[in-house]
């Protein structure tokens, strides 16, 4: 099998398959969260770090006015091509989620698969939440899902999963390369083993992510008073079962309320 070291985000077809195959639970949870936590109706939704638009497309199909932004131009091209293919407006654009503006505020936003942790400094993180505060109206929400670093108990460091679409099969594995607890930077090896009728390829990448304990996140969000933590859930995506955050909490979806 040929191996290449490359940015996995530059392979939108593969990325969309491996990260987009389990969109249904997230979509249903987000709709329930809009109904439960947004003041008034939710018509306009925004996805920062939207990637290939796996949820953006479904939100548009579901009747929302949905838009997204991402730094990767190849992912945005893929997202807009899918929207165009289905007769929808091209609503995704290339932008930095630390520094962007919108013409009209949205009712809600979501970012559910750890993309937030790509912001490697406190400065960038605070800038992101300030930009989001300008993009979401008061009474709206930001559903933010990622992995916390638990203060007690084991941490889930290794993950592997597979996805198939037609004759395309991808086996994925992620495992830690190194961690700097003082700088709060974790690097993970990410491997895609891609099997196609025309041949196979292995793509190796390295993800650089900022770490958060629940205390560190709570302290950081206080720096942007336009937001408060309203509720928290885990990755079971059950809107009727919010969780109590404690020292062992790892998988989390924060519901942040725009003040």
Image (tube, rainbow, N blue to C red):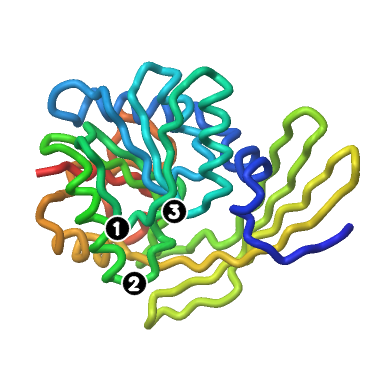
Q: Specify the farthest residue to the bottom.
A: 182
Q: How many marks?
A: 3
Residue 206 versus residue 217: which sits nearer the camera? 206
**Image quadrant occupied by the C terminus:** top left
| Pointer 3 residue | 115
For disc 2, the neighbor class at 10 Å (few under 14, some 14 to 19, many from 20) is some
135 with respect to 28 (left or right)? left
| Pointer 1 residue | 99
Residue in the picture at 23% in, 55% down: 129
For disc 3, the neighbor class at 10 Å (few under 14, some 14 to 19, many from 20) is some
171 with respect to 227 (left or right)? right
101 with respect to 58 (left or right)? left
* Label 2 residue SS: loop
For disc 1, the neighbor class at 10 Å (few under 14, some 14 to 19, many from 20) is few
| Pointer 2 residue | 121
* Label 1 residue SS: loop
Q: Are marks 2 and 1 in contact (CB under 8 Å)?
A: no
Above-or-below relation of 175 to 24: below
Q: CA distance from mark 2 to mark 3?
A: 14 Å
Which is closer to the viewer, label 2 or label 1? 1
Q: Are marks 3 and 1 in contact (CB under 8 Å)?
A: no
- Give percent across and percent down for residue 96: 37, 56
């Amino acid at each position: 099998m040929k191996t290449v070291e490359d940015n996995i985000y530059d392979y939108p077809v593969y990325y969309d398959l491996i990260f987009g195959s389990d969109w249904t639970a997230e979509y249903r949870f987000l709709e329930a969260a809009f109904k439960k936590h947004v003041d008034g109706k939710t018509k306009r939704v925004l996805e920062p770090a939207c990637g290939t638009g796996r949820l953006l497309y479904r939100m548009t199909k579901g009747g929302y006015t949905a838009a997204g932004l991402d730094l990767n131009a190849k992912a945005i091209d893929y997202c807009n091509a899918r929207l165009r293919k289905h007769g929808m407006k091209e609503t995704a654009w290339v932008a930095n989620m630390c520094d962007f503006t919108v013409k009209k505020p949205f009712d809600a936003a979501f970012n559910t698969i750890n993309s937030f942790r790509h912001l490697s400094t406190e400065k960038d993180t605070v800038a992101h939440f300030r930009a989001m505060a300008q993009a979401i109206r008061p009474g709206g929400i930001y559903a933010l899902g990622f992995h916390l670093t638990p203060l007690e108990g084991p941490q889930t460091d290794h993950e592997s999963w597979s996805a198939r679409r037609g004759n395309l099969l991808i086996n994925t594995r992620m495992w830690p390369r190194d961690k700097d607890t003082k700088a709060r930077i974790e690097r993970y090896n990410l491997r895609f083993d891609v099997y196609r009728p025309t041949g196979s390829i292995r793509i190796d990448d390295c993800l650089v992510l900022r770490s958060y304990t629940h205390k560190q996140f709570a302290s950081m969000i206080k720096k942007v008073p336009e937001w408060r933590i309203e509720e928290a859930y885990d990755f079971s995506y059950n809107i009727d079962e919010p969780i109590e955050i404690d020292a062992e909490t790892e998988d989390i979806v924060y519901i942040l309320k725009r003040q």
